[in-house]
């Protein structure tokens, strides 16, 4: 079952004429001509499509709230920042089929009543940027963007905003600050963007993969989408599978596969190595030991292993876990925006301690300090980045994977 990757070509991305030939923009025509906005909202809610940016928030509810807001100006933003190490799904989607993202974005903007939209693109994604820019120009030429789209009274402008590649700018309120020309650091929430977003106006921020599902749902109905995967976490998902597997790459599968199966899909563990653990969901993801591989990563609130953005990193017994711990904290320390003390100082102190763990100078004081820092980062930071920085470390401690931390 493929929704997102079905028509991808090996060598290059689909252009507008390829996309038209595959029935592209028929869903947009359908929503502009045949169905009312409330019906679109009903279909999206029925599908139980959950945001693919990591948090799994229901798309129908987000759109409905923004639709209900009365405002002369609303905005719609596609989040294509994807700075989480090990993730390459949104970037690849944009390179392979930019129109599938754009069609979902136009339908979303139309539904909520936005007339200005942005794609917030990680500035290091050169190929994706070129594909999206060409796709936007083609859409303006074919009246899929601009004034009176396809003869309707709907106007929409879309432009790419190039971010500088900071991880925190993937967080929606920091992303909004960045577009506004402010420092890329998070805002206090609430208010959420659908109430007070870009330039203080109601704004939807959706992940690129989330939006790429929309045209399929409009075409086939929310009920059909709900049948794929599991009802509490339906649809297919793009998994970026990497590390000690035979065939690292991007795979689209229904959301009912357990971790073991996902590793198999990527060819299984590389010859000559033995699986130690799997990290699910990027650097901020859970560390899953061998005997937990039957868990199904999911967006359900009850899920033991959240799917997050969908990266699967397979770590073999040949790899030094202390060095991996250090590389995770190096990432968070570098990407901490510095706005709050617990994260700015905490990630820095933790980095120093994990350096000592790696070079053999770890002592009992370090152990106590490390536990306090884990608690502080887990409970007191301004935004989720602080909490993210210790998710994997907490699992390493819980599963007694490093003798000194047991
Ligand atoms: C530190 C941090 C980084 C994030 N990075 C991304 C990102 O790169 N892409 C993304 O879509 N969402 C990212 N998010 C989640 C966004 O804040 C937001 O929830 C998401 O874009 C909403 O889209 P969705 O509902 O379609 O998932 C990040 C969140 C945090 C806390
Ligand atoms: S938790 Fe980290 S990234 Fe988030 S606001 Fe505080 S310093 Fe910035």
Image (cartoon, rainbow, N blue to C red):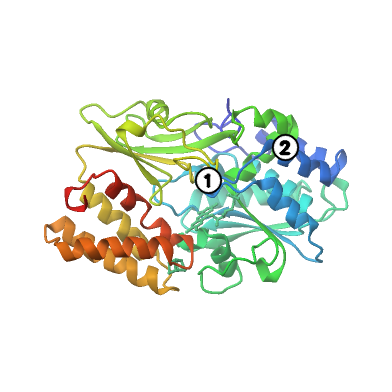
Of the two numbered discs 1 and 2 on the same chain, state the one appearing first in sequence.
2
Can you give x and y, in whole percent of width and height, for residue 308 in the image? Answer: 48, 46
Residue picked out by circle 1 = 90
Q: Within 8 Å: ligand 1 and the Cβ of disc 1? A: yes
**For the point 61% across and 71% down, which residue is it?**
180
Name the mark nearer the viewer: 1 or 2.
2
What kind of element bears circle 1? helix
SS state under label 2: helix
Compared across the picture, whether 22 is left or right of 170 comes to right
Q: Nearer the viewer, residue 71 or 12?
A: 71
- Residue 373 versus residue 7: which sits nearer the camera? 373
Residue at label 2?
46
Residue 23 seen: no
Q: Position of residue 4 (x, y in %)?
A: 59, 35
Q: Residue 238 location, x and y as percent?
A: 51, 37
Report the quarter where the N terminus lies. Answer: top right
Q: Residue at horizontal 66%, vertical 65%?
A: 197
User: In the image, ligand 2 is in what quadrant?
Assistant: bottom left
Q: Nearer the viewer, residue 330 or 289?
A: 289
Q: Quadrant of residue 280?
A: top left
Please indicate whether residue 73 sits to the left or right of residue 168 in the image. right
Work out whether 124 lies above or below 345: above
- Observer-nearest of 133 and 73: 73
């Amino acid at each position: 079952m493929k929704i997102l990757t079905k028509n991808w070509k090996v060598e290059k991305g689909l252009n507008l004429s390829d996309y038209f030939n595959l029935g592209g923009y028929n869903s947009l025509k359908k929503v502009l001509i045949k169905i009312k906005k409330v019906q679109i909202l009903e279909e999206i809610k029925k599908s139980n499509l959950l945001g693919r940016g990591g948090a799994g928030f229901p798309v129908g509810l987000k759109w409905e709230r923004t639709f209900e807001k009365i405002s002369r100006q609303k905005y719609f933003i596609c989040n294509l920042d994807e700075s989480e190490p090990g993730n390459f799904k949104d970037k690849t989607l944009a390179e392979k089929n930019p129109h599938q993202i754009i069609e979902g974005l136009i339908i979303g903007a139309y539904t909520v009543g936005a007339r200005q939209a942005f794609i917030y693109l990680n500035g290091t994604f050169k190929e994706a940027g070129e594909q999206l820019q060409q796709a936007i120009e083609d859409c303006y030429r074919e009246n899929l963007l601009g004034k009176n789209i396809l003869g309707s009274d709907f106007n929409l402008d879309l432009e790419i905003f190039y971010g500088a590649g900071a991880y925190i700018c993937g967080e929606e309120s920091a992303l909004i600050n960045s577009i506004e020309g402010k420092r890329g650091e998070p805002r206090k929430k609430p208010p959420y963007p659908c109430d007070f977003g870009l330039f203080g106006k109601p704004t939807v921020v959706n992940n690129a993969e989330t939006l790429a599902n929309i045209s399929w749902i409009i075409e086939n109905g929310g009920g059909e989408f709900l049948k794929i995967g599991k009802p509490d976490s339906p649809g297919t998902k793009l998994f970026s599978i990497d590390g000690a597997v035979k065939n690292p790459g991007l795979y689209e599968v229904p959301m009912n596969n357990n971790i073991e199966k996902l590793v198999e899909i990527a060819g299984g563990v590389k010859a000559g190595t033995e699986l130690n653990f799997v990290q699910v969901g990027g650097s901020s993801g859970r560390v899953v030991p061998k005997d937990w591989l039957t868990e199904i990563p999911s967006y359900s609130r009850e899920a033991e292993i959240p799917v997050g953005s969908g990266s699967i990193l397979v770590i073999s017994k040949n790899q030094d876990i202390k060095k991996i711990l250090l590389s995770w904290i190096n990432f968070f320390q570098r990407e901490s925006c510095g706005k709050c003390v617990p994260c700015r100082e905490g990630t820095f102190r933790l980095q120093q301690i994990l350096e000592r763990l790696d070079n053999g100078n770890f002592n009992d004081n370090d152990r106590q300090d490390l536990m306090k820092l884990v608690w502080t980062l887990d409970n007191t930071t301004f935004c989720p980045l602080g909490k993210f920085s210790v998710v994997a470390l907490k699992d390493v401690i819980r599963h007694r994977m490093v003798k000194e931390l047991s």
